[in-house]
Amino acid sequence: MYLRIAHRGAPHLAPENSLKGFEAALAFSPDMVEMDVRVSRDGRVVVMHDPTVDRMTTGRGKVALKTLAQLRECRLGNGEPVPTMTEAVDLLKGKADLKIDVKDVGIEDLVVAELRRAGVVRRTIVIAYGRRALRAFKDGCPALRTEVGGVHSRYVRGYAVADALATGALILSTRHKIVTPDFAADCRERGLAIHAWTVNDKKEAARLAGLGIEALATDRLDVI
């Protein structure tokens, strides 16, 4: 049976990457709750998927060009301010394992420091992009589990496997549509797990389960 990962919380009930969304996800007893993080202009780690706040908030502009105070003025669809990683981790720790999708390269130390502060290193997986970031996490915190991000097409699957083997990552974050029987078998032979995203359909979940996929990220915990 696969692990169920709450993709950005419970976006069918509350805005993605919101505290209310994370809280709502817990009601469905997920194995993990996933969030996306970026860094503000003044070096604070905040929860936001996109490089800008335009899609998800009342604000405009790039996350990296705004201070935390400015980001807190940007309101999500339910009126919440943009949450910090600290707020999200403290809400979830002890209730579900965490998956942190680290969108910015170069903030590995900040993310590790936050996980250590909260005492959740061994209950967390970090998704990182590129060998530099993957190695930085492993060098900075060997106990932390790492996952190769960005496996979005068949073309990049081989590169992702190579990155995992070169950096000690044990998981591939893979778009569900590109998971084939051969790819799943190859990963299994190499000791690599596949965490597929974003699966909101029971039929597709069953197909992936039949291939032995270890985990599915979903927007619909009420379905999967």
Image: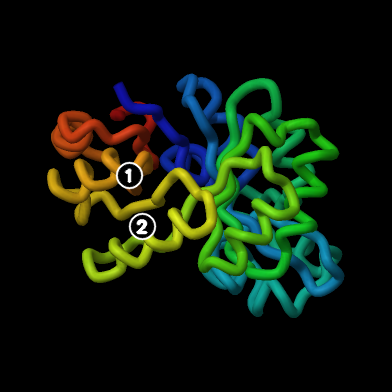
Q: Which quadrant of the figure contains the C terminus?
A: top left
Could you say whether the residue bearing mark 2 is in a helix, strand or loop?
helix
Q: Marks 1 and 2: CB-CB under 8 Å?
A: yes
Q: Residue at x 56, y 53 (%)?
A: 101
Numbered mark located on residue 190 in the image = 1
Image coords of residue 147 (percent x, y)? 49, 50
Q: Residue at x 39, y 40 (%)?
A: 217
| 84 versus 44 height, above or below | above
Can you tell which quarter of the image residue 44 is in?
bottom right
The colour style of the image is: rainbow
Q: Which quadrant of the figure contains the N terminus?
A: top left
Q: How far apart are the alpha carbons under marks 1 and 2?
A: 9 Å
The residue lying toward the viewer, choosing from 122 and 220, is 122
Q: Evaluate whether residue 81 shows in this view.
A: no
Q: On the image, numbered disc 2 is attached to which residue?
A: 161
Image coords of residue 169 (percent x, y)? 50, 49
Q: Residues within 10 Å of mark 1 (few under 14, many from 20)?
A: few
The residue lying toward the viewer, choosing from 105 and 6, is 105
Image coords of residue 92 (percent x, y)? 67, 30
- The amino acid at mark 1 is Arg
Q: Evaluate whether residue 136 shows in this view.
A: yes
